[in-house]
């Protein structure tokens, strides 16, 4: 990263040729494909909108890093695989990182303090103050104050805007997951199911688009806050698509709660939820299991085998009404496997033959409900690829801000996944694979008065794909 000329290092010879190493290579970066992120920002204007969700109390005379640049640096870092703030003490000297954040002084030669010269971007201390401003501990951390309601609303607004324009149906996948804690963070409690101290964030995705990311302590039911989330998500969707759009809430049995189902029924929202088994439910499948085992004994079926049964069911106390339940009777080599879902989707499909086939018991369970497993992939991308579980500050509010940064990184990459990479070999790739193949390209950066020249690795194996991505990115409209 520097131009200093030090004593060369000599390694084992290769035949008659010496192997010599020095640090005279100029400005090099391992993130040559990071320019793609700059083009995505040109299209979305996301960081400019996110900066409007903060109140900046800094004296403009002494500001060297605009708020929009700080947010871009932090979120770009997550997208490029840098989870720790400490990483930025090295990244701040990378002119390519400065370029994608919109810095004019790529080499940091115009910094006011001599100790900062050569370092165009902010270090970990500045970014740390940005995050701790969410808690407003004292005067040092009140300089940049986030407005949580506005950030939450922006994530929802941009997520809804990213939904396909001609959607006839929207499926909202809700899920909660554990976020392990390894210190004495605010709100850290032990969770008996997961077996460790953790947070219990609540997510809502529509396809691969994040709409909701709420950090919570784990001292609550997994579905806590879902109704409040729906009260904001559903109106936002209907405002864009109108009242006739079919909205379906899909989740596992931890969300089969009376308040959620009752709210959906009262507001014209359908649901398809897992239902925890009990003795009364299992009795409804007794005849189905007996029939399957008889056919297995006669050789008419082979294990594993299954069949589906539909019936009306109501709990003794907690439900306000009887509801449509579909039971799966499945015989495996290991034994019986009864499963259940509860749904408000009509068996007759609302009078449409195609929908009636979709909502028939077997199709509804196997093709629709089981598809919620893809939600697990979205959460894995959030936590493994975008480091949403890096909630290591002491305060819940600043950890919530980190979770939002991760969600915005996911949202920033959505046009790349949904539009730019459509029809290519990376169409269904995870964010981690996209990062590895498109962003992690060795590059030499040459900065002069007239131009910034990036020389990418000559041996890069995806040159044709990169060229296609560049072509499609340039065709995207510029944000207003």
Image (cartoon, rainbow, N blue to C red):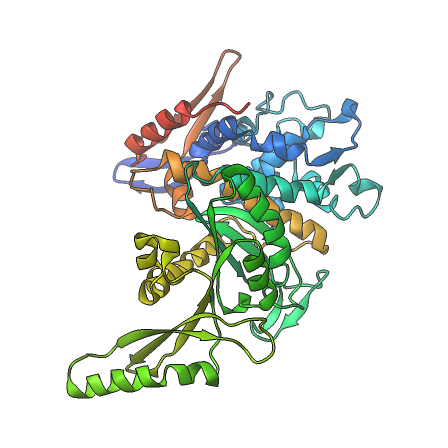
At which x and y percent is residue 73?
59, 35
Q: Nearer the viewer, residue 374 or 233?
A: 233
Q: Residue furthest top?
A: 450
Relative to 67, does residue 201 appear above or below in the rendering? below
Measured along the vertical axis of the image, is residue 322 above or below residue 286? above
- Which residue does the image show at 31% across and 82% down from the upper left? 288
- Seen as rendered, the residue at the extreme right is 139
Is residue 241 shown to the viewer in this render?
A: yes
Rendered location of residue 136, percent (x, y): 79, 46
Q: Position of residue 418 (x, y in %)?
A: 40, 39
Q: Residue placed at 48% from the left, 38% from the top? A: 162
Determine the image quadrant of residue 329.
bottom left
State the residue in front, 475 or 263: 263
Q: Nearer the viewer, residue 53 or 430?
A: 53
Drawn side of residue 304 relative to residue 280, left or right: left
Task: Tell whether 468 sits left or right of 395.
Answer: left
Q: Image height check: is 308 above or below 184?
A: below
Q: Residue 40, how many percent across, how many down?
A: 48, 31
* Residue 440 appears in the figure: no
Q: Quadrant of the C terminus?
A: top right
Name the residue at the front extreme.
351
Is 41 located above or below residue 292 in the figure? Answer: above
Q: How many marks?
A: 0
137 left or right of 198? right
Give left or right: position of 299 versus 278: left
């Amino acid at each position: 990263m520097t131009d200093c000329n030090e004593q060369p290092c000599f390694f084992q010879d290769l035949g008659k040729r010496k192997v010599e190493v020095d640090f005279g290579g100029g400005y090099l970066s391992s993130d040559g494909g990071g320019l793609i992120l700059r083009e995505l920002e040109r299209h979305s204007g996301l960081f400019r909108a996110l900066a409007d969700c903060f109140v900046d109390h800094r004296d403009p005379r002494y500001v060297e890093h605009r708020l929009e640049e700080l947010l871009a640096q932090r979120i770009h870092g997550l997208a490029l695989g840098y989870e720790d703030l400490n990483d930025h003490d090295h990244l701040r000297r990378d002119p390519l990182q400065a370029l994608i954040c919109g810095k004019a002084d790529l080499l940091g030669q115009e910094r006011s303090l001599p100790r900062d010269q050569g370092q165009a971007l902010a270090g970990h201390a500045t970014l740390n103050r940005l995050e701790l401003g969410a808690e407003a501990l004292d005067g040092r951390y009140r300089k940049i104050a986030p407005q949580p309601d506005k950030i939450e609303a922006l994530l929802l607004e941009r997520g809804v805007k990213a939904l396909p324009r001609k959607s006839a149906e929207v499926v909202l996948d809700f899920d909660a997951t554990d976020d392990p804690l390894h210190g004495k963070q605010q709100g850290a409690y032990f969770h008996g199911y997961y077996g460790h101290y953790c947070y219990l964030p609540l997510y809502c995705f529509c396809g691969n688009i994040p709409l909701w990311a709420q950090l919570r302590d784990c001292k609550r039911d997994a579905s806590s806050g879902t109704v409040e989330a729906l009260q904001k998500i559903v109106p936002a969707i209907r405002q864009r698509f109108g009242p006739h759009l079919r909205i379906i809430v899909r989740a596992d049995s931890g969300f089969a709660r009376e308040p959620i189902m009752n709210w959906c029924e009262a507001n014209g929202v359908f649901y398809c939820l897992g239902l925890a088994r009990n003795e009364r439910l299992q009795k409804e499948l007794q005849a189905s299991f007996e029939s399957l085992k008889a056919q297995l004994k006669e050789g008419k079926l082979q294990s594993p085998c299954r069949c589906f049964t539909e019936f009306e069911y109501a709990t003794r106390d907690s439900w306000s009404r009887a509801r449509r339940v579909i039971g799966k009777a499945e015989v495996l080599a290991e034994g019986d496997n009864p499963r259940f879902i509860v749904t408000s989707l009509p068996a007759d499909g609302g009078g449409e033959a195609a929908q009636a086939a979709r909502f028939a018991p077997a199709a509804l369970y196997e093709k629709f409900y089981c598809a919620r497993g893809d939600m697990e992939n979205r959460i894995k991308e959030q936590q493994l690829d975008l480091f949403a579980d890096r909630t290591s500050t002491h305060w819940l509010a600043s950890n919530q801000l980190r979770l939002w940064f991760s969600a915005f990184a996911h949202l920033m990459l959505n046009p790349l996944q949904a539009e730019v990479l459509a029809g290519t070999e990376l169409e269904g790739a995870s964010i981690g694979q996209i990062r590895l193949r498109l962003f992690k390209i060795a590059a030499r950066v040459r900065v002069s008065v007239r131009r910034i020249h990036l020389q990418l690795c000559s041996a890069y194996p995806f040159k044709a794909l990169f060229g296609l991505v560049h072509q499609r990115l340039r065709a995207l409209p510029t944000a207003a």
